Image: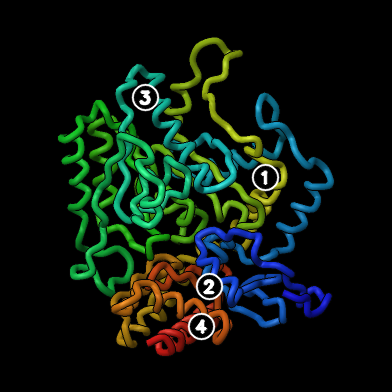
Amino acid sequence: MERASTSPLSVVPNDLEPYWMPFTANRAFKARPRLVARAKDMHYFTPDGRKLLDGAAGLWCTNAGHNRHTIVKAIQAQAAELDYAPAFQFSHPKAFELASRVAALAPGDLDHVFFCNSGSEAVDTALKIALAFHNVRGNASRVRLIGRERGYHGVGFGGVAVGGIVSNRKQFGALLAGVDHLSSTYNRAEQAFTIGEPEWGGHLADELDRLVALHDASTIAAVIVEPVAASTGVLPPPKGYLQKLRAICDRHGILLIFDEVITGFGRMGYAFAAERYGVVPDMITFAKGITSGSVPMGGVLVRKHIYDAFMKGPEHVIELFHGYTYSAHPLACAAGLATLDLYRDENLFERARKLEAPWAQAAMSLKGLPNVLDIRPVGLTVGIDLASKPDAVGKRGYAALEASYYDHDLMLRAVGDTLALSPPLIVSESQIGEIFDKVGKIIKQVA
């Protein structure tokens, strides 16, 4: 592809072929690319200067908006002061400061933080901690992991194994042994067009008792669920479901892990969805919103008794043989601290709670449009199911993705034939109206 100009907004790659894009239809994209060149606050800008309203917070991650000055300034200053510090046997002050700040936001005694670089790494870290925890306590038989159908837990072997999205699993063989799954909590016939948490489905948590009876509790290490299953199309938990899971896990000595990579840092109106639902899990995985997407970072919040179980034996011996070269990277820590300051100073979690009702009302205004089968708003996110074309599942969703970018100057997510929206928490009520006005036009266009 020939360069059209050298101005900052018009420079495009001269060859699209070398980059193998993740979770992307590469041939379709390279035939008609959807490129962005810069971003600010609620908008992306294309290389030719078009302004796109970001209805997806990038990839569920830019919760504080794009290119916020204080975050940019913090990253620049940190790069000039300390570019990297070794993560093994050494560290730097901001790692401890950020861990303290994150722990202070978490409910209960989730007061220790293990840093990594992504949600996928956070999930694999949490699963390994769960297995090692039982091992150091003399319960080495507890090796089984329980996930949930339609769950998404990243792309590591552990995360894919406990995940329950078929297309993410089928290419990769057996994955990990000893994994089982709870049923999905979604039932359209019982839950369609519910705002927030549906009344039907709390009883599905009782399936965990069935799995305990099948495998015996002495073999089960942990259960991992998303409080709201987001990447599969936004599935809010039925009322009472998460509380029941907590009670069953407590009864059988099983660790409960909440994957809050998407729901953390304000998306559900609180620092963590665990607070919204009044449940204290044993671990919380996080990423995305910790730096508002500006620098890759993730982590695992761990309850005190889990951390303490490892702090035995000679003090000079490593307690957990796990970690990453870039754990608590200085630039990520600086970005995280600046992002948490923005969340606090601008009351963005509280703001999200106040916007939840007008967001849901605007989303539900699309009910009755052609091919709309369900709308599921919860927090500042929503899943909109469109009917699949008879001969091509996912084609209507892909057409909507293209139409949003090329025809309506909107950024959204398409998950098969489900449209998912999750704007930055700085979205205004007028921008909420603009988002759903555009989505309505897109749905009609792809009918």
**For the residues carrying marks 2 and 4, which lies nearer the camera in this image?**
2
**Disc 2 residue type?**
Ala
Q: How many marks?
A: 4
> What residue is at 49 percent from the left and 85 percent from the top?
438
Q: Give the mark nearer the N terminus: 2 vs 1.
A: 2
Task: Mark 1 and mark 4 in contact? Answer it, CB < 8 Å.
Answer: no
Q: CA distance from mark 3 to mark 1?
A: 30 Å
Q: Is residue 315 left or right of residue 245?
A: right
Q: Is residue 308 above or below residue 279?
A: above
Task: Quickly name the residue at label 1.
Answer: 333
Q: Residue at x 61, y 57 (%)?
A: 293
Residue 275 in view: no
Mark 4 and mark 3 lie on one chain; the one further toward the N terminus is 3
Callout 3: SS: helix
Nearest the eye: 48 or 276 = 48
Q: Amino acid at mark 3?
A: His
Q: Quadrant of the N terminus?
A: bottom right
Tell me the distance, in whole angstroms, between the alpha carbons under discs 4 and 3.
Answer: 50 Å
Which disc is residue 403 wearing?
4
Residue occupying image coordinates x 54% and y 42%: 299
Spatial CA span between label 1 and label 4: 37 Å
Find out whether the residues at labels 2 and 1 contact each other: C-beta distance under 8 Å. Answer: no
Q: Amino acid at mark 1?
A: Cys
Horizontal and vertical percent for residue 95?
A: 66, 38
Read off the residue under disc 3: 134
Residue picked out by circle 2: 28
* Disc 1 versus disc 4: nearer the observer: 4
Disc 4 crowd, CA 10 A, few/some/many (<14, 14-19, 20+): many
Q: Are marks 4 and 3 in contact (CB under 8 Å)?
A: no
**Are the residues flagged by discs 2 and 4 in contact, CB closer than 8 Å?**
no
